[in-house]
Amino acid sequence: MVKLVFLGPPGAGKGTQASLIADFYEVPHISTGDILRTNVAEKSSLGIQARNYMDKGDLVPDQLILDMVKERLENPDAQKGWILDGFPRTVTQAEEFFKKCEAGGEKAKSGSFFHVINLQVPDDVLVARLLSRGRQDDKEETIRNRLQVYYQQTQPLIEFYKARQQLIIVDGDNYIDAVTSALKQAVDKIYPK
């Protein structure tokens, strides 16, 4: 049963790769942004709570995001596995996610509930990729600042997963097909068919 969390800096291609891998293993690609938008649009009880924060310009609290993710993972399509993109983003979220999984009775053969793929790409390549999109807000200084913020927030999370022996590092500095192939090899080692 494939259960993966995808990490990677802006421009690493994690959304693209998460989607390709999810299709290949026939599991849902679950983005926290999509979950949030769906809950708000459907005016679910969690969506209404989230909207109250969003309308004030506040961040949606970790616990609310966690509840939305957990609810999404209980859907029938996620019973044979899933790929999470954009969550957990902090060590606190990761610890809470573990508690929720444990409370739900989840346990994988490897001793962890899920594994984490970290797509590594050199900063200069990330900057070039993001600049090539041609978006107005994608200026080099802004991009480098976003990368610094990402590393500051994510480095503790990477160490957290490494300590739990859940982290798998994949080189994302290649053509899309080559990265997808490397990811499939890594996933097949964790979840042999």
Image (spheres, rainbow, N blue to C red):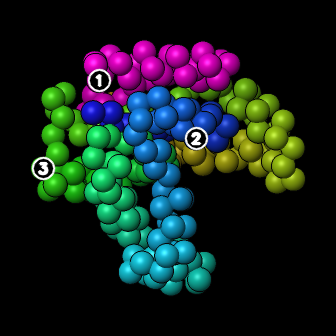
Q: Residue at x 38, y 70 (%)?
A: 64
In the rendered image, the quadrant that contains the N terminus is top left
In the rendered image, the quadrant that contains the C terminus is top left
Amino acid marked by disc 3:
Gly
Crowding near the residue tagged with mark 2, few <14, some 14–19, many ≥20 C-alpha atoms within 10 Å:
many
> Which type of secondary structure does the marked residue at label 3 adopt?
loop
Give how far across and how far down residue 96 sits, in percent: 27, 56
In this picture, is 120 found above or below 42?
Answer: above
For residue 19, the mark is none
Q: Foreground: 40 or 121?
A: 40
Distance of label 1 from label 2 (alpha carbons): 21 Å
Q: Foreground: 34 or 128?
A: 34
Mark 3 vs mark 1: which is more N-terminal?
3
Amino acid marked by disc 1:
Tyr
Q: Foreground: 132 or 161?
A: 132
Q: Which residues are magenta?
A: 164-193
Amino acid marked by disc 2:
Gly
> Which type of secondary structure does the marked residue at label 2 adopt?
helix
Distance of label 3 from label 1 (alpha carbons): 19 Å
Give how far across and how far down residue 69 sits, in percent: 37, 59
For residue 105, the mark is 3
Crowding near the residue tagged with mark 1, few <14, some 14–19, many ≥20 C-alpha atoms within 10 Å:
some
Q: Which residue is mark 1?
A: 191
Q: Which residue is mark 2?
A: 15
Q: Residue at x 64, y 23 (%)?
A: 176
